[in-house]
């Protein structure tokens, strides 16, 4: 079958087509969730998502393969680099084994380089076949991480409680930007990214914090999702953007005890200081993840030679919340 290769600006009924393809392509993967058209419209509005850089393959007008590119500044090797985050690489099962993913990735890489970006960054499961595919394209594994799942811990004596993410946006953004300043893969939380992720989502997440007279001293965000796992679909609170002025086991307990659902999932780098605290609360590894980087110039190549800190796992790229 002949396929027409183009960018997202030329895809008819884009949100509906991306929704159909995403559910077809990712239905077999652990940690994925089924999505609706409202979710897709929100996801395509993510700050930095560029329809001119995102690539598509069409068969008689139907979207059968895709690569979504989101441009954001990311911390890498002690520098802040302009990166193309490669998301939602997907091919309709009926159109696989025809080289579409490779062709679209190559087109995306060319477009990203033409836009003078420093590197491409993506997430994948190291135990699934895409890992080898990305490695052959030149991507380098930068860190190993995992999704942990477990029951919400019992109540603690600390004071984290739900807060208005709009009213307290500046203080919460400042806390998170301070906490993750040494983390690779982190994009500073500017106002537009905060609004998109915390306020404009189809099902806005729950943001909790412990407040003082001078502002928040701890925070976490919880998004409700139905995740596919090896043991079946699980209804969980996905925890992310966890931070504290001084993080310790009591603070972590307080934050995770604030989750709306009885089960919690969260993503952590294997080197994360929070990992022992989370393990002590009974959460266990469910799915492996890696962050991979493809450098396009000397700045990114030099950054990859530097020893990096723990990686900030972008839950919007890995899970889609």
Image (cartoon, rainbow, N blue to C red):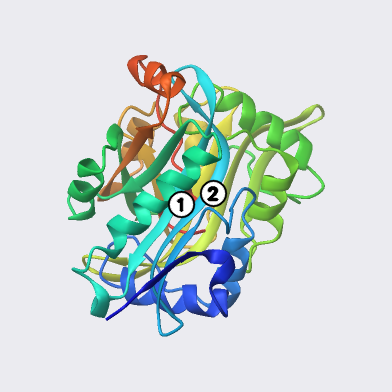
Where is the N terminus found, in terms of image quarters? Answer: bottom left
- In space, the residues marked 2 and 1 are separated at their CA atoms by 10 Å
Residue in the image at 34% along x and 77% along y: 24
- Name which residue lies at 63% across and 56% down: 206
Q: Which mark is residue 97?
A: none
Mark 2 residue crowding within 10 angstroms, few (<14) / some (14–19) / many (20+): many
Query: Residue, x 47% and y 65% (percent of image)?
Result: 6
What x and y, as percent, mark residue 311?
Answer: 41, 31
What residue would you read off at disc 2? 70
Q: Residues within 10 Å of mark 1 (few under 14, many from 20)?
A: some
Depth check, front residue: 209 or 11:
11
Circles 2 and 1, Cβ within 8 Å, touching? The answer is: yes
Which numbered dot is residue 317?
Answer: 1
Q: Position of residue 266 (x, y in %)?
A: 41, 48
- Element type at mark 2: strand
Relative to 260, residue 97 above or below: below
162 relative to 90, above or below: above
- The image position of residue 154, as x and y in percent, is 46, 50
């Amino acid at each position: 079958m002949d396929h027409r290769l183009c960018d997202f600006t030329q895809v008819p009924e884009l949100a509906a087509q991306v929704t159909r393809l995403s559910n077809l392509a990712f239905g077999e993967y652990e940690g994925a969730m089924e999505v609706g058209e409202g979710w897709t419209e929100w996801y395509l509005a993510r700050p930095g998502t560029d329809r001119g850089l995102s690539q598509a393959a069409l068969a008689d007008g139907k979207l059968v393969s895709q690569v979504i590119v989101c441009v954001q500044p990311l911390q890498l090797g002690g520098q802040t680099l302009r990166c193309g985050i490669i998301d939602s690489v997907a091919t309709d099962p009926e159109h696989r084994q025809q080289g579409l993913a490779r062709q679209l990735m190559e087109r995306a890489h060319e477009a990203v380089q033409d836009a003078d970006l420093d590197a491409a960054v993506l997430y994948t499961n190291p135990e699934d076949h895409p890992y080898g595919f990305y490695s052959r394209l030149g991507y380098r594994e930068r860190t190993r991480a995992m999704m942990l799942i477990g029951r919400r811990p019992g109540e603690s004596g600390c004071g984290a409680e739900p807060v208005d993410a709009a009213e307290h946006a500046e203080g919460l953004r400042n806390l998170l930007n301070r906490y993750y300043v040494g983390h690779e893969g982190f994009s500073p939380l500017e106002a537009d990214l905060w609004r998109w992720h915390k306020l404009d989502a189809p099902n806005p997440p729950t943001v909790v914090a412990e407040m003082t007279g001078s502002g928040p001293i701890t925070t976490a965000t919880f998004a409700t999702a139905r995740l596919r796992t090896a043991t079946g679909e699980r209804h969980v609170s996905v925890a992310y953007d966890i931070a504290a002025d001084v993080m310790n086991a009591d603070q972590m307990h307080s934050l995770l005890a604030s989750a709306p659902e009885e089960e919690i999932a969260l993503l952590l780098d294997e080197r994360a200081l929070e990992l022992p605290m989370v393990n002590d609360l009974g959460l266990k590894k469910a799915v492996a993840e890696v962050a991979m980087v493809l450098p396009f110039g000397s700045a990114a190549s030099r950054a990859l030679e530097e020893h990096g800190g723990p990686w900030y796992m972008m839950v919007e790229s890995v899970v889609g919340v």
